[in-house]
Amino acid sequence: MLVKTNWTGKRRFVSKTPSGFEVAMDATETYGGDSQGVTPMELILAGVAGCIGIDVTMLLGRYLEQINKIKIETEGSRREEMPTSFTNILVTFDVEGNIEGERIWKSIRLGHKKYCAVSDSLKANFDYQLILNGVPILEPS
């Protein structure tokens, strides 16, 4: 996989992906940017959500017909010293539908442990939460 990235001024870069899409990145004003694109660290959290989301929906397969909504929030905690990499990432699935929590948890666990290349590429610790129809569902033992 090859992503080509071009500098467009100050701290701005645009990456062109093999799938043909472009992503604009910029630093915040704190780091000399103009906030004209997403930050690289924001892209990492979005990548985690997209990767585990794709895995979970693939693993749920035919049960997707029973789901009305899947919302994923990713929250990262970072080191204070340089490099300010993620130390912990909390991924919260907010799901609405007529499906058992255990089935979703099974897909989350399997997606994380076996399929999600993004989370596997990071050194951060991962925690997951599930909210099903507005009710937090604890991960079964």
Image (tube, grey):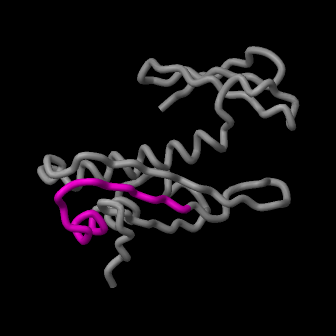
130 left or right, relative to 40: left
78 left or right, relative to 45: right
Q: Quadrant of the C terminus?
A: bottom left
Residue interval drawn in magenta = 90-106
Q: Residue at x 32, y 55 (%)?
A: 95
51 left or right, relative to 106: right
Query: How far across and how far down the image is residue 14, in percent?
Result: 64, 20
As displayed, is residue 19 above or below residue 97?
above
As displayed, is residue 40 above or below residue 5?
below
Q: Residue at x 23, y 46 (%)?
A: 68
Query: How far across and how far down the image is residue 33, in percent?
Result: 82, 27
As displayed, is residue 15 above or below residue 82?
above
Q: Residue furthest bottom?
A: 141
Toward the viewer: 57 or 134? 134
Q: Residue furthest front?
A: 134
Query: How far across and how far down the image is residue 82, in percent?
Result: 84, 55
